[in-house]
Image (cartoon, rainbow, N blue to C red):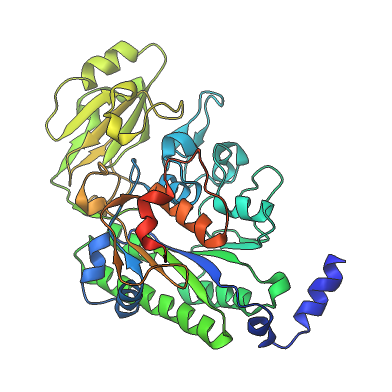
Amino acid sequence: MRLILLIAALLLPVGLAAKESGRPVTVLVGIDGFRADYLDRGVTPRLSKLAAEGATGPMRPSFPTKTFPNHYALVTGKRPDRNGITGNSMIDPRRPGVMFSLGNATQALDPFWWGEAEPVWITAERAGIRTATMFWPGSEVAYGSTRPSDWLRYDQNVGNVQRVNTLIDWLRRPTVIRPAFATIYFDTVDTAGHRFGPDSAEVNAALAEVDARVGDLVDGAAKLGVTLNLVIVADHGMRATDDARVIQLDTLIDRPSYIAVETGPYAAIEPVTGTDDRVAKALLVPHEHMNCTRKEDLPERLHWGTNPRVAAIICIAEAGWTILSGPPMYPVKGGAHGYDNADSEMRALFIARGPAFAKGARLAVFDNVAVAALLRAALGLPEDADADGKLADVQEALRR
């Protein structure tokens, strides 16, 4: 029966989709590394127009201010300590000798790592709302036996134009197979920020290019007669870094004594068995330009450190400094994120525009875990009482 419906739907005239249902499609747009104040540079006219027509405000990322933890926080409403994605790299005592990392597809695509919190596309699918995800971190992995109705495995070689065209093709479908909720992800602003720094001409060019692609999405949906509830977000900001501002762990402790789970603006350090005291004596003392602490002693405001996937010792660098363990894999000069989420340069973009959202609303700084509640409201799903982010935190963004 489902196959018959699919064939029949595909044979319908292209323009009939808009006539079949006036229900808006909620689209979550993720622009990796789009710092909140990038919107003020005058190089993003389409995004600036959407912000003026809808709700906007600076968004505080969760700590650590990294890509995977925050993308999952945005769609689960739970901070990294509770959504299970505690870093771009992490280890779990239930899997000795195994490390999750962005570059290890075997682990990054394993449902084991993603099962501690339910993303909104799974909640929607279970409620009978069709979803489609384009490259959003975590969306390639089944949650139990459920997946988005349509999803694509991340491929950086797929350009931004093709990503938008794929989403527009999904919107072109008749109602029976058209998503009511979709996501799309752009990585080029973050890439330029890392390579050239946040104040570079290359970042401005990347901002302008992504702005044009968002414009293509808006225009393409309008031509199809499909109304969008757009929620446009970033996972974190970006701060300039330099080769002269480096803290080298090798000068403090011999490398065989510890596992550097993650380095950069913060370092996650797991002592090798039998070296706990030696590593602690080397790191848990005052240092210039970084502060190291046991995970259980981290400031409460970070809401991070209770999950067993968080390494034993956490060192957080002073803003603009970089913690390394041996030679860097990439040049340090450029830009980075991962700093304390109280750092204003870690703040992220937020825009909500469409019939579900208020016009001209300007929000004070809020925590990004509230975005999931906003998405649920736009989709008609009940609020998750167990979430860290509450709809009340972003109530001003909703149309009254």
> Where the N terminus falls, by quadrant?
bottom right
Please identify the residue farthest to the front as the structure is shown: 400
Q: Is residue 335 above or below residue 111?
A: below
The residue drawn where x is 42% and y is 46% is 390
x, y percent for residue 77: 46, 46
Residue 140 appears in the picture as rendered: no
x, y percent for residue 225: 57, 85
Q: Is residue 117 above or below residue 285?
A: below
x, y percent for residue 210: 38, 73
Q: Nearer the viewer, residue 78 or 312?
A: 78
Residue 128 placement, left or right of 327? right
Residue 196 placement, left or right of 23? left
Q: Nearer the viewer, residue 390 or 202?
A: 390
Count how many numbered circles sit on residues in the image: 0
Q: Nearer the viewer, residue 270 or 87?
A: 87
The residue drawn where x is 53% and y is 31% is 98
Residue 180 appears in the picture as rendered: yes
Q: Quadrant of residue 89?
A: top left
Residue 264 placement, left or right of 154? left
Residue 77 placement, left or right of 142? left
> Where the C terminus falls, by quadrant?
bottom left
The residue drawn where x is 33% and y is 53% is 236
x, y percent for residue 94: 56, 24
